[in-house]
Image (cartoon, rainbow, N blue to C red):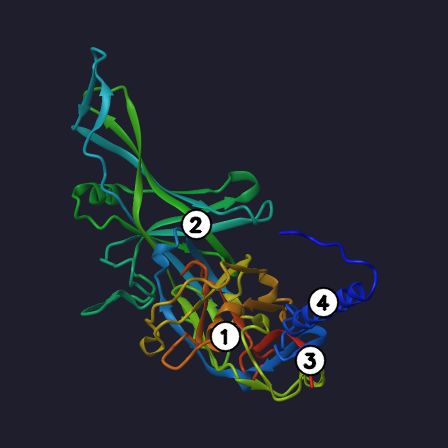
Amino acid sequence: MRVGRVSAGTGARAGVAVCLAALVGVFAACEEQSPTSIDPDGVPLSVRTVEIEIPWSEVGSRLESFGGFGSPSVIGTSFVTNGLGGLVDARTLVRFDTFPSGVAVRDSTGALVTDTLITIRSGQLIVVADTADADSLTSWTLGAGVLDQEWDPRTTTWESAIDSVGQGRPWDEAGAGPVRSLGEATTVIGESGDSIRFDLDATTLAEWADSADSERSARIDLVAGGERVQLFNLSVRLEIGSVAAPDTTVFRDVPLVERTFIYTPAPEAPDGVVRAGGAPAWRTVLGLEIPAQVNGPAELCELAGCPYTLTSGALSRASLVLQSRATAPAAFQPVDSVLLDVRPVLAPDALPKSPLGNSLIGQASIGPDAFGASPGEPLEIPITDFVRAILNAEDGDDPPTDLALLSLVEPLDLAYVEFDGPDGPGAPVLRLLLTVSDPVGYR
């Protein structure tokens, strides 16, 4: 194709006009499809993020606490208390493994043999306590006793040795009694370390070594009042004599096979507060009804008009804000940081046994003072995707609308935490961050 030259005359001016017209059309098209416009029918003069706080009275549909999740036997540690907070008594129960039927020794010829003709000369019950947070020279006096009654570590309580479906058996005496005393022992933290030892009498050694069916159980109590002592490990150490090697003494540790703790009184069900944790654990279910429209605050109405229709596209963040309160009774206040989790409730009709969805937060940590000396600390739970699913729901969709607040591990501790309920000074609040604009339409 041959290209001609255009002179700077009438033809040139016409060409420039055509180009300018084309450019105007391009720019107009770009303005009509502005990528920064939230309103497809207009161009925003400004885009702003507005925070809305909706009180629980307007969005809450359910607030209910459920207890009984898990057993203290799965925690891995146990507790003893005596009048903790002027109220709570706790005792540790343990069951030990079978005693050895033989030991390996070297006979008079130096050969390694297994001697089954052994004699248990003595034994000690050894209790290892948590001394990490105890002041130097703090002393604890513990008592130990042989427990002859059968008990179930997963269901036992202060009143019942066994409390399973179809089988219930109370203790002869409430609190896992009676026991045959092994005496008392005292440890002074700065002097004697963290181990507390009780000598096992000949009767106990004979009974526990007799057969695999022997109960081999003990109860540990805290004699002094006002304390909470965590017990890490318990074992029996045996001193064993051998016929094959009379001059040899062998020491063997017998580990525990069952462990739990029982306490009294059991906490009453909460009335109008949010509770999580404890052993067995508590959970609280909070139901939300996300409004289709909102009529405030004034900043939102001035910018985008009210009533304002909530959409997932405008939602930048959503969170549920709870405010901590002092756990009551004070004996159940936590002594360490608390890890909490929040999960959607997948089958509300099946509560309290409803399955839960994936965690919405991973974990949230909050210090113990928030539930004791310094209540009123906020816990902000991010639920953006949870709320978006509700806003995006179409006919036939059934996204979860209930949340479960629980401890990250159930159960983990004797203590539990509480937050204000609907009638408290820090009632739950739904906090929304919306990105909105004030559009100007074309005429």
Callout 4 secondary element = helix
Residue 311, picture quadrant: bottom right
Callout 3 secondary element = strand
Q: Amino acid at mark 2?
A: Leu
Vertical comparison of 100 with 73: above or below: above
3 or 2: tag closer to the N-terminus = 2
Whether residue 383 is visible to the viewer of this picture, yes or no, is no
3 or 4: tag closer to the N-terminus = 4
Residue that carries the numbered disc 2 in the rendered image = 231
Residue visible at 65% across and 85% down? Answer: 296
Question: Label 2, label 1: how many angstroms apart (C-alpha)?
Answer: 29 Å
- Return the x and y of residue 294 as percentages of the image width and height: 59, 85
2 or 1: tag closer to the N-terminus = 2
Residue visible at 57% across and 77% down? Answer: 430
Vertical comparison of 242 with 412: above or below: above
Out of 305 and 354, give the one closest to the viewer.
305
- Return the x and y of residue 260 as percentages of the image width and height: 35, 56
In the displayed orientation, state which residue is furthest to the right.
9
Residue that carries the numbered disc 4 in the rendered image = 23
In the figure, is residue 377 to the left or right of 146? right
2 or 4: tag closer to the N-terminus = 4
Q: Nearer the viewer, mark 3 or mark 4?
A: 4
Callout 3: few (<14), some (14-19), or many (20+) C-alpha neighbours within 10 Å?
Answer: some
1 or 3: tag closer to the N-terminus = 1
Q: Which numbered marker is on residue 439?
A: 3
Cβ atoms at labels 3 and 2 below 8 Å apart: no
Residue 284, picture quadrant: bottom left
Residue visible at 39% across and 54% down? Answer: 75
Question: Label 2, label 4: how many angstroms apart (C-alpha)?
Answer: 81 Å
- Return the x and y of residue 213 as percentages of the image width and height: 16, 48
